[in-house]
Amino acid sequence: MQNDALKVIPLGGLGEIGMNAMVFETHSDMVLIDCGLQFPDASYPGVEVLVPDLSYVLERLEKLRGIVVTHGHDDHIGAIPFLLREKALHIWATPFPQGLIQHKLTEFPGTHEAHFHVIEPRKKFRVGEFEFDPIPVQHSIIEALAFAVKTPAGIVIHSGDFKHDPKETSRGEITFRAFEEYGDQGVALLLSDSTNAEREGHTLSEVDIEKSFERILSQQSGRLIIALFASNIRRVERILALAKKNGKKVAFMGRSMHSYTRLAFEQNSLSIPEDTVILIENLGQYKDEEVVVLATGSQAEPRSALVRVAEGIHKDLKIKKNDTIVMSSRFIPGNERAITRMIDNLYRSGADVLYESVHQIHVSGHGFQEELLMMLKATRPQFFIPIHGEFRHLSKHAKLAKRAGVQEENVLVIEDGQAVELCAGRMRLAERFEIQKLPAVDNLFVDGSREALQQKHALAKAGIVFVALFRDEKTGELLSDPVVSTQGLLLYHGEEESVMIEGARAKLIEVNDEFGNRDDFVDIVKLETRRYFRKHVSYKPVVIPVVMDCVSQMKRS
Ligand SMILES: [Zn+2]
Protein backbone atom coordinates (compact mmCIF):
# COMPACT_ATOMS: atom_id res chain seq x y z
CA MET A 1 0.00 0.00 0.00
CA GLN A 2 1.15 3.54 -0.72
CA ASN A 3 1.86 5.90 2.17
CA ASP A 4 -1.04 8.16 1.29
CA ALA A 5 -3.59 5.41 0.66
CA LEU A 6 -6.53 4.30 2.79
CA LYS A 7 -8.22 0.96 2.49
CA VAL A 8 -11.80 0.63 3.71
CA ILE A 9 -13.04 -2.93 4.23
CA PRO A 10 -16.55 -3.68 5.47
CA LEU A 11 -16.63 -6.96 7.42
CA GLY A 12 -20.30 -6.64 8.34
CA GLY A 13 -23.36 -4.41 7.96
CA LEU A 14 -23.18 -3.85 4.20
CA GLY A 15 -25.77 -5.98 2.44
CA GLU A 16 -27.46 -6.83 5.73
CA ILE A 17 -28.89 -5.23 8.86
CA GLY A 18 -26.67 -5.90 11.86
CA MET A 19 -23.13 -7.02 12.77
CA ASN A 20 -21.55 -3.73 11.76
CA ALA A 21 -17.78 -3.83 11.50
CA MET A 22 -15.60 -1.63 9.32
CA VAL A 23 -11.83 -1.74 8.87
CA PHE A 24 -9.78 1.38 8.05
CA GLU A 25 -6.24 0.44 7.03
CA THR A 26 -3.13 2.33 5.94
CA HIS A 27 0.32 0.97 5.08
CA SER A 28 1.19 0.91 8.80
CA ASP A 29 -2.00 0.89 10.89
CA MET A 30 -5.41 -0.63 11.09
CA VAL A 31 -8.44 0.34 13.16
CA LEU A 32 -11.81 -1.34 13.47
CA ILE A 33 -14.88 0.88 13.70
CA ASP A 34 -17.55 -1.06 15.61
CA CYS A 35 -17.68 -4.82 15.96
CA GLY A 36 -21.28 -5.91 16.33
CA LEU A 37 -23.33 -9.05 16.12
CA GLN A 38 -26.55 -10.10 14.48
CA PHE A 39 -29.52 -12.13 15.66
CA PRO A 40 -30.09 -14.98 13.22
CA ASP A 41 -33.25 -15.78 11.30
CA ALA A 42 -34.78 -19.21 10.80
CA SER A 43 -32.01 -20.22 8.39
CA TYR A 44 -29.77 -20.74 11.44
CA PRO A 45 -31.80 -23.15 13.60
CA GLY A 46 -30.57 -23.34 17.18
CA VAL A 47 -28.04 -20.53 16.72
CA GLU A 48 -28.21 -17.64 19.24
CA VAL A 49 -26.03 -14.99 17.62
CA LEU A 50 -24.02 -14.44 14.46
CA VAL A 51 -20.58 -12.86 14.63
CA PRO A 52 -18.81 -11.23 11.68
CA ASP A 53 -15.93 -13.08 10.08
CA LEU A 54 -12.94 -11.18 11.43
CA SER A 55 -10.22 -13.25 9.73
CA TYR A 56 -8.99 -10.20 7.83
CA VAL A 57 -8.22 -8.53 11.15
CA LEU A 58 -7.01 -11.69 12.88
CA GLU A 59 -4.45 -12.30 10.13
CA ARG A 60 -3.06 -8.79 10.64
CA LEU A 61 -3.34 -8.41 14.40
CA GLU A 62 0.08 -6.76 14.64
CA LYS A 63 -1.32 -3.84 12.64
CA LEU A 64 -4.52 -3.48 14.64
CA ARG A 65 -4.34 -0.41 16.88
CA GLY A 66 -7.78 -0.95 18.40
CA ILE A 67 -11.53 -0.60 18.10
CA VAL A 68 -13.42 2.67 17.98
CA VAL A 69 -17.08 2.48 18.98
CA THR A 70 -19.87 4.66 17.56
CA HIS A 71 -22.52 3.61 20.11
CA GLY A 72 -23.66 0.83 22.42
CA HIS A 73 -26.19 -1.15 20.37
CA ASP A 74 -25.42 -4.87 20.17
CA ASP A 75 -25.08 -4.72 16.40
CA HIS A 76 -22.12 -2.36 17.01
CA ILE A 77 -20.42 -3.73 20.13
CA GLY A 78 -21.72 -7.30 20.59
CA ALA A 79 -18.81 -9.10 18.92
CA ILE A 80 -16.03 -7.21 20.74
CA PRO A 81 -15.69 -9.88 23.47
CA PHE A 82 -15.13 -12.53 20.78
CA LEU A 83 -12.19 -10.50 19.45
CA LEU A 84 -10.86 -10.03 22.99
CA ARG A 85 -10.52 -13.81 23.17
CA GLU A 86 -7.78 -13.45 20.53
CA LYS A 87 -5.92 -10.37 21.69
CA ALA A 88 -5.81 -7.62 24.30
CA LEU A 89 -7.33 -4.54 22.69
CA HIS A 90 -7.47 -0.81 23.01
CA ILE A 91 -11.08 0.33 22.85
CA TRP A 92 -12.19 3.93 22.40
CA ALA A 93 -15.77 4.50 23.53
CA THR A 94 -17.97 6.90 25.49
CA PRO A 95 -18.87 5.79 29.04
CA PHE A 96 -22.24 4.16 28.26
CA PRO A 97 -21.06 1.68 25.59
CA GLN A 98 -17.93 1.12 27.67
CA GLY A 99 -20.13 0.08 30.63
CA LEU A 100 -22.16 -2.19 28.35
CA ILE A 101 -19.01 -3.86 26.97
CA GLN A 102 -17.66 -4.38 30.49
CA HIS A 103 -20.98 -5.91 31.50
CA LYS A 104 -20.82 -8.27 28.51
CA LEU A 105 -17.29 -9.32 29.37
CA THR A 106 -18.53 -10.85 32.63
CA GLU A 107 -20.13 -13.53 30.44
CA PHE A 108 -16.82 -14.19 28.65
CA PRO A 109 -14.36 -15.60 31.16
CA GLY A 110 -10.69 -15.74 30.19
CA THR A 111 -10.61 -12.98 27.58
CA HIS A 112 -7.55 -10.78 27.15
CA GLU A 113 -7.55 -7.34 28.65
CA ALA A 114 -9.59 -4.47 27.27
CA HIS A 115 -7.78 -1.14 27.62
CA PHE A 116 -10.52 1.48 27.56
CA HIS A 117 -10.05 5.07 26.44
CA VAL A 118 -12.93 7.39 27.22
CA ILE A 119 -14.18 9.47 24.30
CA GLU A 120 -15.78 12.86 24.73
CA PRO A 121 -17.78 14.58 22.00
CA ARG A 122 -15.63 16.86 19.82
CA LYS A 123 -12.42 15.93 21.70
CA LYS A 124 -10.08 14.62 19.03
CA PHE A 125 -7.97 11.53 19.67
CA ARG A 126 -5.36 9.59 17.73
CA VAL A 127 -5.37 5.90 16.94
CA GLY A 128 -2.17 5.09 15.04
CA GLU A 129 -2.10 7.24 11.94
CA PHE A 130 -5.74 8.21 12.29
CA GLU A 131 -7.14 11.24 14.03
CA PHE A 132 -10.75 10.84 15.14
CA ASP A 133 -13.16 13.69 15.81
CA PRO A 134 -16.25 12.33 17.59
CA ILE A 135 -19.37 14.21 16.52
CA PRO A 136 -22.53 13.62 18.58
CA VAL A 137 -25.56 12.45 16.60
CA GLN A 138 -29.11 11.56 17.55
CA HIS A 139 -30.15 7.92 17.60
CA SER A 140 -32.27 5.56 19.70
CA ILE A 141 -29.51 5.20 22.28
CA ILE A 142 -27.60 7.80 24.27
CA GLU A 143 -24.05 8.91 23.41
CA ALA A 144 -24.27 8.00 19.72
CA LEU A 145 -21.41 9.32 17.62
CA ALA A 146 -20.35 9.87 14.06
CA PHE A 147 -16.64 10.21 13.35
CA ALA A 148 -14.71 12.57 11.14
CA VAL A 149 -11.46 10.69 10.60
CA LYS A 150 -8.33 12.37 9.32
CA THR A 151 -6.56 9.75 7.20
CA PRO A 152 -3.56 9.92 4.82
CA ALA A 153 -6.10 9.92 1.96
CA GLY A 154 -8.16 12.79 3.33
CA ILE A 155 -11.13 13.27 5.67
CA VAL A 156 -13.50 10.33 5.91
CA ILE A 157 -16.83 10.69 7.70
CA HIS A 158 -18.43 7.61 9.23
CA SER A 159 -21.96 8.54 10.23
CA GLY A 160 -22.57 5.70 12.71
CA ASP A 161 -26.32 5.28 13.14
CA PHE A 162 -28.09 8.62 13.12
CA LYS A 163 -31.23 10.64 12.64
CA HIS A 164 -31.97 14.32 12.93
CA ASP A 165 -34.61 15.34 15.44
CA PRO A 166 -34.38 19.13 15.86
CA LYS A 167 -37.16 19.26 18.47
CA GLU A 168 -35.44 16.78 20.78
CA THR A 169 -32.90 18.89 22.67
CA SER A 170 -33.44 17.60 26.18
CA ARG A 171 -29.71 17.12 26.76
CA GLY A 172 -28.18 19.94 24.78
CA GLU A 173 -28.54 20.93 21.18
CA ILE A 174 -27.35 18.62 18.45
CA THR A 175 -26.88 20.20 15.05
CA PHE A 176 -25.34 19.42 11.71
CA ARG A 177 -22.90 22.33 12.01
CA ALA A 178 -19.87 20.09 12.55
CA PHE A 179 -20.66 18.18 9.37
CA GLU A 180 -21.06 21.42 7.46
CA GLU A 181 -17.69 22.63 8.73
CA TYR A 182 -16.06 19.46 7.49
CA GLY A 183 -17.92 19.91 4.23
CA ASP A 184 -16.30 23.36 3.92
CA GLN A 185 -12.86 21.86 4.53
CA GLY A 186 -13.47 19.09 2.02
CA VAL A 187 -14.60 15.55 2.75
CA ALA A 188 -12.97 12.82 0.67
CA LEU A 189 -15.36 10.03 1.56
CA LEU A 190 -18.70 9.75 3.36
CA LEU A 191 -19.91 6.43 4.79
CA SER A 192 -23.52 6.90 5.88
CA ASP A 193 -26.28 4.87 7.57
CA SER A 194 -28.80 3.48 5.04
CA THR A 195 -31.23 1.61 7.32
CA ASN A 196 -34.20 3.84 6.44
CA ALA A 197 -33.14 4.90 2.95
CA GLU A 198 -36.44 3.57 1.59
CA ARG A 199 -38.58 5.76 3.80
CA GLU A 200 -39.57 9.12 2.43
CA GLY A 201 -39.69 12.34 4.41
CA HIS A 202 -38.40 12.96 7.90
CA THR A 203 -38.67 10.87 11.08
CA LEU A 204 -41.26 11.95 13.57
CA SER A 205 -39.84 13.67 16.64
CA GLU A 206 -39.50 11.92 20.00
CA VAL A 207 -41.27 15.04 21.28
CA ASP A 208 -44.33 14.18 19.14
CA ILE A 209 -44.65 10.71 20.53
CA GLU A 210 -44.42 12.19 24.00
CA LYS A 211 -47.87 13.68 23.32
CA SER A 212 -49.24 10.22 22.54
CA PHE A 213 -47.77 8.87 25.75
CA GLU A 214 -49.14 11.80 27.73
CA ARG A 215 -52.63 11.06 26.37
CA ILE A 216 -52.33 7.33 27.07
CA LEU A 217 -51.07 7.89 30.62
CA SER A 218 -53.66 10.47 31.52
CA GLN A 219 -56.50 8.28 30.23
CA GLN A 220 -55.39 4.95 31.63
CA SER A 221 -58.03 3.03 33.57
CA GLY A 222 -56.07 -0.18 34.15
CA ARG A 223 -52.37 -0.98 34.36
CA LEU A 224 -50.16 0.20 31.54
CA ILE A 225 -47.34 -2.03 30.31
CA ILE A 226 -44.99 -0.32 27.88
CA ALA A 227 -42.66 -2.56 25.90
CA LEU A 228 -39.56 -0.90 24.48
CA PHE A 229 -35.85 -1.47 23.97
CA ALA A 230 -34.06 -1.06 27.30
CA SER A 231 -31.25 0.77 25.49
CA ASN A 232 -33.61 3.62 24.57
CA ILE A 233 -32.68 5.55 27.71
CA ARG A 234 -34.13 8.89 26.55
CA ARG A 235 -37.55 7.37 25.96
CA VAL A 236 -37.41 5.64 29.35
CA GLU A 237 -36.54 9.02 30.90
CA ARG A 238 -39.43 10.74 29.09
CA ILE A 239 -41.92 8.14 30.29
CA LEU A 240 -40.60 8.41 33.86
CA ALA A 241 -41.06 12.20 33.76
CA LEU A 242 -44.59 11.88 32.36
CA ALA A 243 -45.41 9.28 35.02
CA LYS A 244 -44.24 11.63 37.76
CA LYS A 245 -46.28 14.48 36.29
CA ASN A 246 -49.40 12.32 36.18
CA GLY A 247 -48.91 10.82 39.66
CA LYS A 248 -48.07 7.32 38.45
CA LYS A 249 -45.67 4.67 39.73
CA VAL A 250 -43.25 2.91 37.40
CA ALA A 251 -41.83 -0.61 37.72
CA PHE A 252 -39.03 -2.02 35.56
CA MET A 253 -39.46 -5.54 34.23
CA GLY A 254 -36.87 -7.70 32.45
CA ARG A 255 -33.17 -8.25 32.98
CA SER A 256 -31.83 -5.78 30.43
CA MET A 257 -34.36 -3.11 31.52
CA HIS A 258 -32.72 -3.26 34.94
CA SER A 259 -29.12 -3.40 33.75
CA TYR A 260 -29.37 -0.61 31.12
CA THR A 261 -31.26 1.80 33.37
CA ARG A 262 -28.95 1.08 36.31
CA LEU A 263 -25.87 1.78 34.18
CA ALA A 264 -27.31 5.00 32.74
CA PHE A 265 -28.41 6.14 36.21
CA GLU A 266 -24.98 5.45 37.72
CA GLN A 267 -23.37 7.44 34.92
CA ASN A 268 -25.76 10.39 35.46
CA SER A 269 -27.26 9.88 32.01
CA LEU A 270 -30.74 9.07 33.28
CA SER A 271 -32.69 11.13 35.76
CA ILE A 272 -35.20 9.17 37.78
CA PRO A 273 -37.80 11.36 39.52
CA GLU A 274 -38.23 10.81 43.24
CA ASP A 275 -40.98 8.56 44.58
CA THR A 276 -41.77 7.22 41.15
CA VAL A 277 -40.04 3.87 40.77
CA ILE A 278 -41.48 0.85 42.56
CA LEU A 279 -40.53 -2.82 42.59
CA ILE A 280 -42.35 -5.13 40.22
CA GLU A 281 -43.20 -7.51 43.08
CA ASN A 282 -45.06 -4.68 44.85
CA LEU A 283 -47.46 -3.88 41.99
CA GLY A 284 -50.39 -5.16 44.04
CA GLN A 285 -49.98 -2.36 46.58
CA TYR A 286 -51.03 0.30 44.07
CA LYS A 287 -54.24 1.07 42.23
CA ASP A 288 -54.27 -0.31 38.69
CA GLU A 289 -54.68 3.10 37.08
CA GLU A 290 -51.53 4.32 38.88
CA VAL A 291 -49.27 1.57 37.60
CA VAL A 292 -46.91 1.80 34.62
CA VAL A 293 -44.56 -1.08 33.83
CA LEU A 294 -41.57 -0.65 31.49
CA ALA A 295 -40.84 -4.03 29.99
CA THR A 296 -38.40 -5.76 27.67
CA GLY A 297 -39.64 -8.20 25.08
CA SER A 298 -40.94 -5.82 22.41
CA GLN A 299 -39.58 -8.23 19.77
CA ALA A 300 -41.15 -11.26 21.52
CA GLU A 301 -37.70 -12.64 22.21
CA PRO A 302 -38.06 -16.12 23.71
CA ARG A 303 -37.94 -16.05 27.54
CA SER A 304 -38.27 -12.24 27.60
CA ALA A 305 -40.43 -10.64 30.28
CA LEU A 306 -43.34 -9.72 28.01
CA VAL A 307 -43.50 -13.15 26.37
CA ARG A 308 -43.71 -14.74 29.82
CA VAL A 309 -46.44 -12.28 30.78
CA ALA A 310 -48.36 -13.12 27.57
CA GLU A 311 -48.05 -16.82 28.31
CA GLY A 312 -49.30 -16.28 31.86
CA ILE A 313 -46.09 -17.61 33.46
CA HIS A 314 -44.52 -14.41 34.80
CA LYS A 315 -44.35 -14.63 38.57
CA ASP A 316 -45.00 -10.94 39.30
CA LEU A 317 -47.43 -9.94 36.61
CA LYS A 318 -50.60 -11.69 35.50
CA ILE A 319 -52.65 -9.93 32.85
CA LYS A 320 -56.14 -8.91 33.77
CA LYS A 321 -58.99 -7.13 32.07
CA ASN A 322 -58.36 -3.42 31.53
CA ASP A 323 -54.58 -3.81 31.29
CA THR A 324 -53.12 -2.05 28.25
CA ILE A 325 -49.88 -3.05 26.55
CA VAL A 326 -48.11 -0.37 24.50
CA MET A 327 -45.67 -1.75 21.94
CA SER A 328 -43.27 1.19 21.66
CA SER A 329 -40.96 -0.23 19.03
CA ARG A 330 -40.85 -1.34 15.46
CA PHE A 331 -41.67 -4.95 14.59
CA ILE A 332 -38.26 -5.96 13.28
CA PRO A 333 -38.61 -8.08 10.11
CA GLY A 334 -38.20 -11.73 11.00
CA ASN A 335 -39.84 -11.24 14.41
CA GLU A 336 -43.33 -10.36 13.20
CA ARG A 337 -44.82 -13.81 13.61
CA ALA A 338 -43.57 -14.22 17.17
CA ILE A 339 -44.75 -10.68 18.01
CA THR A 340 -48.25 -11.16 16.61
CA ARG A 341 -48.52 -14.50 18.44
CA MET A 342 -47.58 -12.71 21.67
CA ILE A 343 -50.10 -9.93 20.99
CA ASP A 344 -52.83 -12.52 20.38
CA ASN A 345 -51.99 -14.14 23.72
CA LEU A 346 -52.21 -10.76 25.43
CA TYR A 347 -55.65 -10.14 23.89
CA ARG A 348 -56.74 -13.63 24.96
CA SER A 349 -55.88 -12.73 28.55
CA GLY A 350 -58.20 -9.74 28.30
CA ALA A 351 -55.68 -6.92 27.66
CA ASP A 352 -55.77 -4.23 25.01
CA VAL A 353 -52.66 -3.76 22.88
CA LEU A 354 -51.54 -0.57 21.11
CA TYR A 355 -48.89 -0.69 18.42
CA GLU A 356 -47.00 1.55 16.09
CA SER A 357 -49.05 1.06 12.94
CA VAL A 358 -52.15 2.35 14.73
CA HIS A 359 -50.85 4.83 17.30
CA GLN A 360 -47.90 7.24 17.31
CA ILE A 361 -45.94 5.47 20.00
CA HIS A 362 -42.62 4.85 18.32
CA VAL A 363 -40.16 6.65 16.07
CA SER A 364 -37.17 5.12 14.41
CA GLY A 365 -33.60 5.86 15.48
CA HIS A 366 -32.46 5.95 11.86
CA GLY A 367 -32.98 8.98 9.63
CA PHE A 368 -35.41 8.90 6.71
CA GLN A 369 -34.56 10.18 3.23
CA GLU A 370 -34.68 13.88 4.13
CA GLU A 371 -32.20 13.35 6.95
CA LEU A 372 -29.89 11.26 4.76
CA LEU A 373 -29.97 14.09 2.23
CA MET A 374 -29.08 16.55 5.00
CA MET A 375 -25.96 14.52 5.81
CA LEU A 376 -24.98 14.33 2.13
CA LYS A 377 -25.57 18.04 1.58
CA ALA A 378 -23.74 19.08 4.76
CA THR A 379 -20.62 17.01 4.12
CA ARG A 380 -20.57 17.36 0.28
CA PRO A 381 -18.23 14.37 -0.08
CA GLN A 382 -16.17 13.66 -3.16
CA PHE A 383 -16.88 9.94 -2.78
CA PHE A 384 -19.76 8.13 -1.15
CA ILE A 385 -20.35 4.57 0.10
CA PRO A 386 -23.71 3.77 1.69
CA ILE A 387 -23.34 1.55 4.80
CA HIS A 388 -25.60 -0.19 7.35
CA GLY A 389 -28.35 -1.76 5.29
CA GLU A 390 -29.55 -4.51 3.04
CA PHE A 391 -28.66 -4.20 -0.61
CA ARG A 392 -31.88 -2.39 -1.53
CA HIS A 393 -31.29 0.18 1.22
CA LEU A 394 -27.74 0.78 -0.01
CA SER A 395 -28.95 1.12 -3.61
CA LYS A 396 -31.67 3.57 -2.63
CA HIS A 397 -29.17 5.60 -0.62
CA ALA A 398 -26.80 5.69 -3.62
CA LYS A 399 -29.62 7.26 -5.68
CA LEU A 400 -30.13 9.88 -2.99
CA ALA A 401 -26.42 10.71 -3.13
CA LYS A 402 -26.72 11.52 -6.83
CA ARG A 403 -29.68 13.74 -6.04
CA ALA A 404 -27.51 15.50 -3.46
CA GLY A 405 -24.90 16.24 -6.08
CA VAL A 406 -22.33 13.45 -5.69
CA GLN A 407 -20.97 12.39 -9.09
CA GLU A 408 -22.49 9.11 -10.17
CA GLU A 409 -19.09 7.48 -10.82
CA ASN A 410 -17.98 8.47 -7.31
CA VAL A 411 -20.62 6.38 -5.57
CA LEU A 412 -19.88 2.72 -4.81
CA VAL A 413 -22.50 0.26 -3.62
CA ILE A 414 -20.50 -2.56 -2.07
CA GLU A 415 -21.15 -5.46 0.28
CA ASP A 416 -19.25 -7.17 3.09
CA GLY A 417 -15.77 -8.30 2.11
CA GLN A 418 -15.30 -5.84 -0.76
CA ALA A 419 -12.28 -3.63 -0.07
CA VAL A 420 -12.09 -0.12 -1.48
CA GLU A 421 -8.93 1.94 -1.82
CA LEU A 422 -8.83 5.69 -1.59
CA CYS A 423 -5.65 7.36 -2.79
CA ALA A 424 -4.61 10.66 -4.39
CA GLY A 425 -8.16 11.83 -5.02
CA ARG A 426 -9.29 8.55 -6.55
CA MET A 427 -11.37 5.68 -5.26
CA ARG A 428 -11.27 2.18 -6.69
CA LEU A 429 -12.46 -1.33 -5.86
CA ALA A 430 -9.64 -3.39 -4.32
CA GLU A 431 -9.63 -7.08 -3.31
CA ARG A 432 -12.75 -9.01 -2.48
CA PHE A 433 -12.72 -11.39 0.48
CA GLU A 434 -15.07 -14.30 1.01
CA ILE A 435 -16.98 -13.53 4.19
CA GLN A 436 -19.13 -15.95 6.12
CA LYS A 437 -21.05 -15.33 9.32
CA LEU A 438 -19.94 -17.26 12.38
CA PRO A 439 -22.74 -18.75 14.46
CA ALA A 440 -22.40 -18.96 18.22
CA VAL A 441 -24.29 -20.61 21.07
CA ASP A 442 -23.61 -19.67 24.71
CA ASN A 443 -20.93 -17.26 23.45
CA LEU A 444 -18.98 -20.11 21.83
CA PHE A 445 -18.61 -20.63 18.11
CA VAL A 446 -20.41 -23.63 16.64
CA ASP A 447 -20.08 -25.37 13.29
CA GLY A 448 -21.78 -23.07 10.80
CA SER A 449 -20.83 -24.99 7.67
CA ARG A 450 -23.41 -25.45 4.97
CA GLU A 451 -23.50 -29.21 5.72
CA ALA A 452 -24.10 -28.70 9.44
CA LEU A 453 -26.95 -26.26 8.78
CA GLN A 454 -28.46 -28.54 6.12
CA GLN A 455 -28.43 -31.39 8.63
CA LYS A 456 -30.15 -29.20 11.21
CA HIS A 457 -32.84 -28.29 8.68
CA ALA A 458 -33.30 -31.93 7.65
CA LEU A 459 -33.66 -32.95 11.30
CA ALA A 460 -36.25 -30.28 11.91
CA LYS A 461 -38.16 -31.03 8.75
CA ALA A 462 -38.17 -34.80 8.65
CA GLY A 463 -37.18 -36.16 12.07
CA ILE A 464 -34.72 -38.91 12.82
CA VAL A 465 -34.70 -42.75 12.76
CA PHE A 466 -32.09 -44.78 14.61
CA VAL A 467 -31.55 -48.32 13.34
CA ALA A 468 -29.30 -51.00 14.87
CA LEU A 469 -28.63 -54.52 13.60
CA PHE A 470 -26.69 -57.07 15.68
CA ARG A 471 -25.37 -59.93 13.57
CA ASP A 472 -23.34 -63.07 13.99
CA GLU A 473 -19.95 -62.17 12.61
CA LYS A 474 -19.51 -65.61 11.02
CA THR A 475 -22.90 -66.28 9.47
CA GLY A 476 -24.24 -62.72 9.11
CA GLU A 477 -27.53 -63.85 10.66
CA LEU A 478 -29.38 -61.44 12.91
CA LEU A 479 -28.86 -62.18 16.61
CA SER A 480 -31.96 -60.24 17.64
CA ASP A 481 -34.79 -58.27 16.07
CA PRO A 482 -33.54 -55.02 14.51
CA VAL A 483 -33.73 -52.02 16.83
CA VAL A 484 -35.72 -49.13 15.33
CA SER A 485 -36.27 -45.92 17.23
CA THR A 486 -37.70 -42.63 15.93
CA GLN A 487 -37.79 -38.98 17.05
CA GLY A 488 -39.76 -36.12 15.60
CA LEU A 489 -41.63 -37.96 12.83
CA LEU A 490 -44.99 -36.51 11.91
CA LEU A 491 -47.37 -39.40 11.31
CA TYR A 492 -50.44 -39.33 9.08
CA HIS A 493 -53.68 -39.22 10.93
CA GLY A 494 -54.71 -42.69 12.08
CA GLU A 495 -51.28 -44.17 11.55
CA GLU A 496 -49.77 -45.86 14.58
CA GLU A 497 -46.09 -45.53 15.28
CA SER A 498 -45.75 -49.04 16.71
CA VAL A 499 -47.23 -50.56 13.55
CA MET A 500 -44.90 -48.55 11.38
CA ILE A 501 -41.86 -49.54 13.43
CA GLU A 502 -42.90 -53.19 13.28
CA GLY A 503 -43.04 -52.87 9.50
CA ALA A 504 -39.60 -51.28 9.48
CA ARG A 505 -38.18 -54.19 11.48
CA ALA A 506 -39.66 -56.72 9.05
CA LYS A 507 -38.22 -54.73 6.17
CA LEU A 508 -34.75 -54.73 7.77
CA ILE A 509 -34.83 -58.50 8.26
CA GLU A 510 -35.55 -58.84 4.53
CA VAL A 511 -32.78 -56.41 3.70
CA ASN A 512 -30.30 -58.39 5.80
CA ASP A 513 -31.29 -61.65 4.12
CA GLU A 514 -30.90 -60.15 0.68
CA PHE A 515 -27.91 -57.80 0.97
CA GLY A 516 -26.26 -58.87 4.25
CA ASN A 517 -23.01 -59.94 2.59
CA ARG A 518 -22.51 -56.77 0.57
CA ASP A 519 -19.59 -54.43 1.48
CA ASP A 520 -21.87 -51.41 1.30
CA PHE A 521 -24.45 -53.03 3.55
CA VAL A 522 -24.58 -50.05 5.97
CA ASP A 523 -25.41 -47.70 3.09
CA ILE A 524 -28.09 -50.09 1.86
CA VAL A 525 -29.66 -50.19 5.35
CA LYS A 526 -29.73 -46.39 5.37
CA LEU A 527 -31.22 -46.17 1.89
CA GLU A 528 -33.86 -48.86 2.41
CA THR A 529 -34.90 -47.37 5.77
CA ARG A 530 -35.32 -43.95 4.17
CA ARG A 531 -37.36 -45.50 1.36
CA TYR A 532 -39.57 -47.37 3.79
CA PHE A 533 -40.37 -44.21 5.78
CA ARG A 534 -40.73 -42.18 2.61
CA LYS A 535 -43.61 -44.51 1.69
CA HIS A 536 -45.24 -44.17 5.11
CA VAL A 537 -44.72 -40.56 6.12
CA SER A 538 -44.05 -39.09 2.67
CA TYR A 539 -40.69 -37.52 3.59
CA LYS A 540 -37.27 -39.05 4.12
CA PRO A 541 -36.07 -38.80 7.71
CA VAL A 542 -32.43 -38.60 8.76
CA VAL A 543 -31.40 -42.25 9.32
CA ILE A 544 -28.56 -43.30 11.61
CA PRO A 545 -27.69 -46.95 10.86
CA VAL A 546 -25.52 -49.09 13.13
CA VAL A 547 -24.51 -52.62 12.11
CA MET A 548 -22.61 -54.65 14.72
CA ASP A 549 -21.10 -57.98 13.80
CA CYS A 550 -20.68 -59.86 17.09
CA VAL A 551 -19.14 -63.07 18.35
CA SER A 552 -22.02 -64.87 19.99
CA GLN A 553 -23.61 -68.22 20.61
CA MET A 554 -26.99 -66.62 20.84
CA LYS A 555 -29.20 -67.09 17.82
CA ARG A 556 -32.40 -65.35 16.88
CA SER A 557 -35.24 -67.70 17.55
ZN1 LIG B 1 -27.79 1.70 16.55
Image (spheres, grey):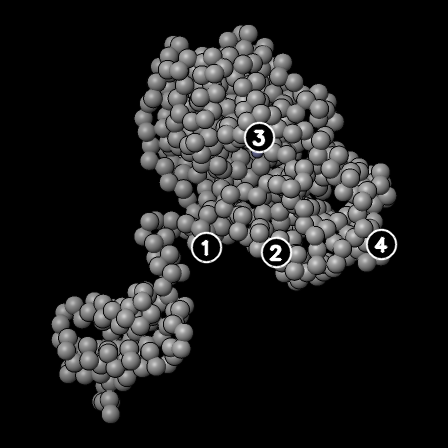
Q: Residue at x 45, y 26 (%)?
A: 396
Residue 120 pos. (x, y %): 65, 23
Foreground label between 1 and 4: 4
Q: Earlier in the sequence, mark 1 or mark 4?
A: 1
Foreground label between 2 and 3: 2
Q: Quadrant of the N terminus?
A: top left
Q: Residue at x 41, y 49 (%)?
A: 43
Q: CA distance from mark 1 to mark 4?
A: 42 Å
- Residue that carries the numbered disc 1 in the rendered image: 46
**Crowdedness near tag 1: few (<14), some (14–19) or many (≥20) residues, C-alpha within 10 Å:** some
Q: Amino acid at mark 4?
A: Lys
Q: Earlier in the sequence, mark 4 or mark 2?
A: 4
Asked which secondary structure carries label 1, the reply is loop
Q: Earlier in the sequence, mark 2 or mark 1?
A: 1
Foreground label between 4 and 2: 2
- Residue that carries the numbered disc 3 in the rendered image: 366
Q: Indicate if the residue with disc 3 has its beta carbon within 8 Å of ligand 1.
A: yes
- Residue that carries the numbered disc 4 in the rendered image: 287
Asked which secondary structure carries label 4, the reply is loop
Q: Amino acid at mark 2?
A: Asp
Identify the image quadrant of residue 483: bottom left
- Above or below for 110 versus 310: above
Q: Do tag 1 and tag 3 residues touch (Cβ < 8 Å)?
A: no
Q: CA distance from mark 4 to mark 2?
A: 26 Å
355 or 135: nearer the eye?
Answer: 355
Q: Residue at x 57, y 18 (%)?
A: 374
- Residue that carries the numbered disc 2 in the rendered image: 344
Quadrant of the displayed image that contains ligand 1: top right
Q: Confirm whether residue 306 shows in the render.
A: yes
Q: Earlier in the sequence, mark 2 or mark 3?
A: 2
Q: CA distance from mark 3 to mark 4?
A: 38 Å
Q: Amino acid at mark 1?
A: Gly
